[in-house]
Image (spheres, rainbow, N blue to C red):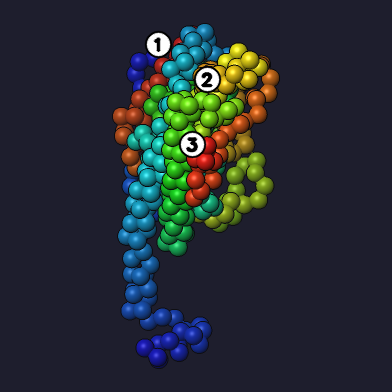
Amino acid sequence: MPDLLERSSAGGVALPPDAARLESLLVADERPARSELRRQIARLERELGELFASAFPRKGIEWSVAPGGGPRLLGVGELEQIRDELAERIAEVKGVLGERAYVETRNREVLERMVANPEKFKWVRISNVDVGEQGCRHWHSRPRWGLLGMLMGWWRVKLSSGCPLPSAGPEPRSQLVRIPMGSASRFDEDL
Amino acid sequence: MAEELIAKQGWVAPVLRNEFPGLAISWTELDGPSGRSPEPLRKRLREISDRFHGGHAVHMRERPIPWAYRVFFRQIGLDPDQTRTPVEELALERMKRGGFKSRSQLDDALTVATIETGVALRAFDSEKMLGRLGIRDSGPGESLEGRPGELPTGTLVIADERRPLGLLFGATASGRGVHPSTRRITVAAIQVKGVPQIAVEEALWVTTVAMAVD
């Protein structure tokens, strides 16, 4: 082999027939690898699609994976890169969904307590988005009969539904209940 | 009303056929020109708009045919969230605009067929084509008419027997697309692995029927 390498690196010397045949075999041998990578990409794409559907209606999640400069036939290295980026994206999305599911669960717990004891959650407003659901419904803890209810401590949870019409002006400012990850509910101390 | 579909099978370059089993192109020829969409077709478009809602769009990529195109996009180096597959592009438009907007009889026919079947369709001017349609990789020095510069070697294109007519799932070469004065229209269906032949035939048939509506 050293002889062969020296002759090749010397330049201008053609590879012997056996070496040329070996080289062509090595190139042809990449096709099964490409085929396997494409199969893996297909599986990961299915998983990403399922995550996309399960994530709805949550917004602000990054789904994109860097394109490979196509449309063209990609080599093994490029297919590997796409596969790896897809796998990374799936892991990221799963992480984000896990965090949001935690926050939404905590918000649902707060909502249950708020409905049971509205006077302990004065002016708190929880929307469908906060509990991971679709729509514009929200629950709002407000005094019954305005100022009188405020003075007397007559609180109730008012449930609103329906999305505003497009002509109804700008969307009201969000008053989402946000519970930071890893910390206790801000309402725990009230209970 | 046209009831018989004459679909022709195109060619795929051997290297692509080996790499992508299932990749195929079929086409049919229709009479032009394509003018304003007739009322029955616009009505059908409205009905499809009414039937198609957010749930369909969200779960679309879980359905076999849209998923097959997404996978193929990934495999050829396109990100289907940036370069949308034809059916997802239409679904997005439906969500953004509140309905499928009528443009011309050909556009409406393609929209109906794509939404109903999920199959990717393209249209070309038949009189500007030479020979059979096919899918191949571009050679050195080749370009797409109307676009500056050369195509990177190996770019996947839809071509006739002389030149590229458009990128596979991309721009159409200048002068090869359909114009109001086009007399004969070639509608091509691009099939990838996972898309059944019957869906391709249905897509071409739905387009043919929609183009025959008066």
Q: Quadrant of residue A84?
A: bottom left
Q: Give, as a three-letter code, the residue at label 3.
A: Leu
Of pointers 3 and 2, the one earlier in the residue sequence: 2
Tell me whether circle 3 and circle 1 mark residues in contact (CB < 8 Å).
Answer: no
**Residue neighbourhood size for the residue with mark 2, other residues' Cα within 10 Å, grouped as few (<14), some (14–19), many (≥20):** many
Residue B214 versus residue B24 in the image, above or below: above
Q: Give, as a three-letter code, the residue at label 2.
A: Arg
Closest to the observer, A141 or A93? A141
Distance, label 3 to label 2, CA atoms, is 17 Å
Which residue lies at the image location 44% right of the left edge and 81% below the top edge?
A14
**Residue neighbourhood size for the residue with mark 1, other residues' Cα within 10 Å, grouped as few (<14), some (14–19), many (≥20):** few
Name the quarter where the N terminus of chain A is drawn: bottom left
Distance, label 1 to label 2, CA atoms, is 64 Å
- Nearer the camera: disc 3 or disc 1: 3
Q: Give, as a three-letter code, the residue at label 1.
A: Met
Which residue lies at the image location 55% right of the left edge and 21% below the top edge?
A155
Chain to which the residue tagged by mark 1 belongs: B
Which residue lies at the image location 54% right of the left edge and 45% below the top edge?
A180
**Position of residue A141 in the picture relative to residue A28 (left or right):** right
According to the picture, the residue beneath numbered tag 3 turns out to be: A191
According to the picture, the residue beneath numbered tag 2 turns out to be: A156
- Nearer the camera: disc 1 or disc 2: 2
What kind of element bears circle 2?
strand
Residues flagged by tags 3 and 2 on a common chain = yes
Tell me whether circle 1 and circle 2 mark residues in contact (CB < 8 Å).
Answer: no
Residue A136 appearing in the image: no
Give the x, y percent position of residue A101.
44, 41
Give the x, y percent position of residue B68.
38, 40
Residue B74 versus residue B98 in the image, above or below: below
According to the picture, the residue beneath numbered tag 1 turns out to be: B1
